[in-house]
Image: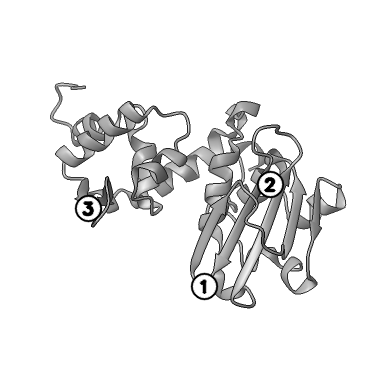
Amino acid sequence: MEYGQFCPIAKATEIIGEKWTILVVRELLMGGTRFSELQRGLSMISPTMLSKRLDTLEQHGLVMKKKIPSQKGYEYFPTKSCSELLPIIKTLGDWGMRWARSNLTEKDYDVELLMLYLKRSINPENLIGKETVIRFKFTDIKEYPSWWMVVKGNEVDLCVNDPGKEIDVYFTTTVRTMAAIWMGDTTYKKALACDELKLVGPKVLTKDISSWMEISVFADIAPASEI
């Protein structure tokens, strides 16, 4: 895609303006390194398209591709030029929170993306003990309604199969409600009061969930219609 203009905005858009590219960059900057991790955060992208976008980013020096030692496959790491896109991505998210939320539809509430974001939001230092197991049950979906997070040290594992461990905290809610809480459109307290969320676990963990599972960095941005 070429615009035939010397404008730096046009030249930048030639690299990052194609479909999916900005979201691939988002996943790289959020810490995704393996192909499967990147695809998990972009559930509707085809493997062929993801490979193509990663190749383009590598050609333009935004990504370094490295062989995984003693394993098949590669890891992908953002370079300095890619990392410099972080404030731009953040500003784009700020704009989206203000002006684009009215475009949300039911199909946008992707449980896989939600759980990936919740996993990334875990703050292990504020949990108690060597291991914490959290279970989410979503009542509005039939495929993969149950998810588990196992937090051990600084590692957070996410799975859809019962790990066979004792559960510390249970969440029962809908994907839409949990996404709304994470995005700051509602709160745990309001969701509990409206019976949109059921929470079971020791009070020391349930009284201040945001201390160990942070909400979105965009959560304090109100839509333009409320300003």
Q: Which residue is mark 2?
A: 178
Q: Are marks 1 and 3 in contact (CB under 8 Å)?
A: no
Please state if 19 lies on the left or on the right of 131 as rendered: left
Q: Secondary structure at mark 1?
A: loop
Q: CA distance from mark 2 to mark 1?
A: 25 Å
Q: CA distance from mark 1 to mark 3?
A: 28 Å
> Can you tell which of label 2 and label 1 is closer to the viewer?
1
> Residue 203, percent across and down?
79, 71
Q: Which residue is mark 3?
A: 79
Please state if 77 lies on the left or on the right of 5 as rendered: right
Q: Is residue 76 above or below residue 127?
A: above
Query: What's under tag 2, amino acid-wise?
Result: Met
Q: Secondary structure at mark 3?
A: loop
> Residue 226, percent across and down?
67, 41
Q: Which residue is mark 1?
A: 153
Considering the image in quadrants, where does the N terminus appear? top left
Residue 214 appears in the rendering = no
Q: Looking at the image, tell me whether mark 2 or mark 1 is earlier in sequence order.
A: 1
Residue drawn at point x = 61 percent, y = 62 percent: 213
